[in-house]
Image (cartoon, helix red, strand yellow):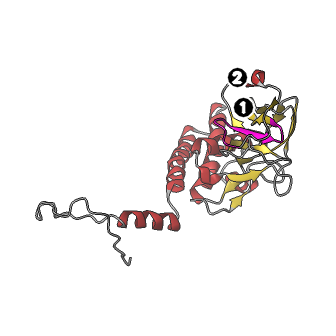
């Protein structure tokens, strides 16, 4: 369960240094990459934050030049139906058609009396009918049917500190997992160079394996509001275990809400 609080990578590194000196084995960039991989593999959405490329409280809008634009570096996944033209706020629709750019046609002149009840996704501007723009994500780029312009999109991202290194949710077992992962990665290199004995390395590895499972389990624990909602859904079911005794005379009646005081 993520509390919304985060700690820096330096905080975890300081705790790891108290156990093992690894400064000459792993540099901070390799450690940062290791942390990225850990967070990705945990695949817990509560670790991520939401950002919007609106240029106000979020990154600058994505510039589209010659139908292409670079996506934010911290992007993990784009939130569904959130890609839109920054100026007009018109939504773009995703496509899996690799030839969609070839399908772009000029505006079609239509009758001005044409209403908005179309059988396909389109928008009407005065006397022309323009097909809504499409987009495709590929190799860190967004390819659109817009030749030029700017895009506003919402996406899930890793929180970063001022140096561009990932921040870690303030979850006890997750912090311990990252600490022991760093120590295990350094320990295997030191053991290979015979600078630590096998017994010490096995101890470090056992700690890493323990917190790997413990962190995953802790992230799955629901918050109090989530548990309350689950309890309410469960208690709305009136479970009558005596249907055989009353010959099923009330079987199939609408559910009854039974309030409980826990």
In the rendered image, residue 143, in percent from the top left (x then y), is placed at: 78, 31
Residue occupying the point 83% across, 31% down: 68
Q: Nearer the viewer, residue 147 or 115?
A: 115
In the rendered image, residue 249, in percent from the top left (x then y), is placed at: 16, 63
Q: Earlier in the sequence, mark 2 or mark 1?
A: 2
Q: Residues within 10 Å of mark 1 (few under 14, many from 20)?
A: some
Q: Is residue 175 magenta?
A: no
Q: Is residue 123 magenta?
A: yes
Numbered badge on residue 97: none
Q: Nearer the viewer, residue 68 or 19?
A: 68
Q: In the visual, does 204 lie left or right of 121?
A: left
Quarter of the C terminus within the rendering: bottom left
Q: Quadrant of residue 11?
A: bottom right
Q: Decide: marks 2, 1 in contact (CB < 8 A)?
A: yes
Q: Quadrant of residue 32?
A: top right
Quarter of the N terminus within the rendering: bottom right
Q: Is residue 157 in sight in this rendering?
A: no
Residue under numbered circle 1: 136
Mark 1 element type: strand
Q: In the visual, does 9 lie left or right of 179?
A: right
Numbered badge on residue 98: 2
Q: Is residue 153 in sight in this rendering?
A: yes
Report the label total. 2
Q: Main secondary structure of the magenta part?
A: loop
Above or below, comparing residue 213 to residue 105 in the picture:
below
Q: Nearer the viewer, residue 226 or 171?
A: 226
Residue occupying the point 36% across, 67% down: 235
In the rendered image, residue 153, in percent from the top left (x then y), is placed at: 76, 46
Residue occupying the point 83% across, 53% down: 162
- Magenta-colored span: 116-128
């Amino acid at each position: 369960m993520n509390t919304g609080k985060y700690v820096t990578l330096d905080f975890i590194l300081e705790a790891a240094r108290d156990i093992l000196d690894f400064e000459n084995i792993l540099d901070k960039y390799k450690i940062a990459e290791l942390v990225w991989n850990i967070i990705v593999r945990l695949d817990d959405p509560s670790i991520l934050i939401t950002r919007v490329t609106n240029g106000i409280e979020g990154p600058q809008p994505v510039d589209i030049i010659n139908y292409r634009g670079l996506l934010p570096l911290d992007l993990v996944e784009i939130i569904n139906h959130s890609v839109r033209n920054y100026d007009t706020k018109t939504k773009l629709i995703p496509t899996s058609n690799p030839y969609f750019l070839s399908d772009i046609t000029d505006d079609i002149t239509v009758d001005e009396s044409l209403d908005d009840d179309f059988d396909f996704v389109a928008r009407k501007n005065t006397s022309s009918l323009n097909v809504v723009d499409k987009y495709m994500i590929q190799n860190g780029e967004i390819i659109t049917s817009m030749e030029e312009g700017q895009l506003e999109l919402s996406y899930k991202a890793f929180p970063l500190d001022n140096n561009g290194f990932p921040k870690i949710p303030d979850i006890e077992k997750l912090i311990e997992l990252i600490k022991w992962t760093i120590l295990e990665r350094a320990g295997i290199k030191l053991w290979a160079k015979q600078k630590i004995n096998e017994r010490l390395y096995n101890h470090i590895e056992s700690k890493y394996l323990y917190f790997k499972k413990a962190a995953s389990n802790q992230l799955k624990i629901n918050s109090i509001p989530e548990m309350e909602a689950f309890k309410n859904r469960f208690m709305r079911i009136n479970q009558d275990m005596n249907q055989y005794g009353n010959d099923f005379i009330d079987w199939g009646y609408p559910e009854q809400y039974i309030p409980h005081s826990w």
